[in-house]
Image (cartoon, rainbow, N blue to C red):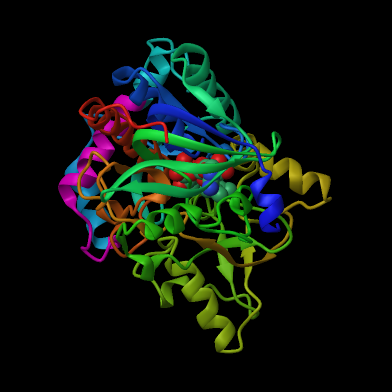
């Protein structure tokens, strides 16, 4: 755009107490919580809040340990998978608080399955070779639609969809708002805010899964440009085993119900690379690469041994993927199919904006971070953790950051409208 054209772009200024950037699960939770402590909360989403990014396309399986579960055993396994680089107290807090958040959604009438007694419908089973991992499954699109309704309809969070934040504003070393482009109105909006929650997701652009193209690492760039520290970026180059011809997630559950990776000779090989088979998510691409390098590729996933009744359950749980396969005339269970390491970036990795505490504070005053935008190393260290922890992290860190940002905002004076 020429400078003359740039000068003619209409500009408006809006003022709010808390600005939330990103309308995934972390951002919606942040906005809902912030509104409990602040009068004015503005959520800005470059797509459509509740329908863009990873949350809406997720497999919607979330870890769910109740206070009666054996958290000590779970944490011992988690610490081992994390190469002992996690923060056990923080991780325990997230796991416990996640249970509270799920129940809170149920109490609002949200689409999370409960039994006749009103208890969360949980399934227990082996995942990544770890026994008895307890989780809850739901429809991610329905949940995100519901969370949007709670934020906008009930909590009166103001929302700007189709609006990309391009820059954070800093005054005297404190974040005081952001600049955004409103694509449909073709205008620039300067947002003055007393506190900002960055929940703009991770970085997996051109990744293999639905939702990946919406998260391009903008959160990291925005934070970095105002001097915020990032951490664990060396773990941000994540890959996850994926069906070659269509977006497929839920690999860990397929492995848990009998799926076997085989090399070109039909041999299983994961046990050569991992202490457990099924293996933690991050070890599978490494094992695949090892076999290909040794001339034993391509790698196929053999699902033929999975009993018919279990297949049907999987098809119901992962309806989006199954429908896609059906439409392409593919029956993944009929014969071994080629799988490869699909790019996942930071979406299930530890990389992100460094948090100083559970409240989501970053190293820059006035700036809070949550979800994939924030480093989840306290939870998964150097590993990939139980994959169902990602949504737990998004919900818990979002709610925490929203509350603390709003409390911070209450201590600030009204920003100048300049
Ligand atoms: C296919 C798939 C399946 C998954 N399955 C599971 C699962 O079963 N269980 C599990 O626990 N985890 C799963 N995950 C991971 C999980 O979905 C994510 O970790 C979680 O949803 C991240 O939530 P978030 O709110 O931080 O980010 P997102 O949901 O990605 O939301 C970020 C939002 O920010 C917006 N945004 C980005 N930049 C800007 C900007 N500059 N201005 C304004 N808005 C911006 C994006 O449009 C997006 O809507 C899965 C991920 C994928 C991709």
Instruction: Check the image and report above or below for 178 versus 302.
Output: above
Residue at 45% of width from left, 52% of height from top? 219
* Residue 88 within the segment the image draws in magenta: yes
Quadrant assignment for the C terminus: top left
Q: Examine the rendering and report whether any part of residue 58 can be seen.
A: no
Residue at 71% of width from left, 51% of height from top? 5
Q: Where is residue 325 in the image (x, y as percent from the top left)?
A: 75, 48
Relative to 322, is 54 on the left or the right? left
Of residue 102 and residue 44, the one placed in the foreground of this image is: 44
Of residue 173 and residue 35, the one placed in the foreground of this image is: 173
Relative to 154, is 88 on the left or the right? left
Magenta segment's dominant SS is helix
Of residue 173 and residue 154, the one placed in the foreground of this image is: 173
Quadrant assignment for the N terminus: bottom right
Q: Where is residue 102 in the image (x, y as percent from the top left)?
A: 37, 26
Specify start and end residues of the magenta stretch as a single range: 81-101
Relative to 349, is 328 on the left or the right? right
Residue at 51% of width from left, 18% of height from top? 152
Residue at 63% of width from left, 75% of height from top? 266
């Amino acid at each position: 755009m020429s400078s003359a054209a740039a000068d003619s772009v209409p500009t408006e200024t809006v003022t709010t107490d808390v600005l939330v950037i990103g309308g995934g699960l972390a951002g919606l939770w942040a906005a809902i919580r912030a509104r409990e402590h602040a009068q004015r909360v503005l959520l800005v989403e470059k797509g459509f809040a509740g329908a863009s990014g990873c949350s809406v396309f997720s497999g919607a399986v979330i870890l769910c340990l109740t206070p009666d579960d054996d958290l000590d055993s779970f944490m011992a396994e988690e610490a081992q998978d994390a190469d002992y680089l996690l923060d056990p107290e923080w991780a325990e807090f997230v796991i416990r608080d996640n249970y509270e958040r799920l129940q809170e959604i149920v109490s609002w009438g949200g689409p999370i399955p409960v039994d006749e007694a009103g208890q969360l419908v949980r399934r227990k089973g082996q995942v990544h070779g770890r026994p008895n991992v307890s989780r809850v499954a739901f429809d991610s699109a329905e949940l995100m639609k519901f969370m949007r309704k709670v934020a906008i309809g009930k909590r009166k969070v103001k929302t700007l969809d189709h609006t990309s934040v391009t820059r954070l504003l800093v005054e005297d070393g404190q974040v005081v708002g952001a600049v955004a482009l409103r694509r449909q109105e073709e205008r620039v909006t300067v947002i003055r805010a007393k506190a900002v929650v960055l929940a703009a997701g991770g970085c997996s652009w051109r990744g293999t899964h639905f939702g990946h193209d919406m998260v391009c690492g903008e959160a990291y760039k925005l934070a970095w440009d105002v001097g915020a520290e990032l951490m664990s970026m060396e773990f941000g180059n994540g890959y996850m085993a994926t069906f070659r011809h269509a977006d497929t997630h839920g690999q860990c559950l397929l492995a848990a119900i009998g799926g076997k990776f085989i090399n070109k000779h039909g041999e299983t090989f994961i046990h050569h690379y991992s202490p457990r088979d099924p293996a933690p998510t991050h070890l599978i691409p490494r094992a695949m690469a090892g076999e290909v390098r040794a001339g034993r590729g391509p790698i196929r996933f053999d699902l033929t041994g999975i009993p018919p009744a279990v297949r049907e359950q999987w098809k119901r749980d992962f309806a989006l993927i199954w429908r896609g396969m059906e439409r392409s005339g593919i029956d993944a269970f009929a014969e071994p199919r080629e799988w490869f390491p699909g790019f996942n970036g930071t979406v299930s990795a530890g990389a992100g904006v460094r948090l100083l505490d559970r409240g989501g504070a970053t190293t820059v005053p006035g700036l809070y971070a949550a979800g994939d935008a924030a480093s989840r190393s306290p939870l998964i260290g150097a590993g990939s953790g139980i994959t169902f922890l990602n949504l737990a992290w998004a919900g818990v860190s979002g709610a925490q950051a929203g509350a603390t940002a709003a409390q911070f905002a209450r201590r600030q004076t009204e920003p100048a409208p300049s």
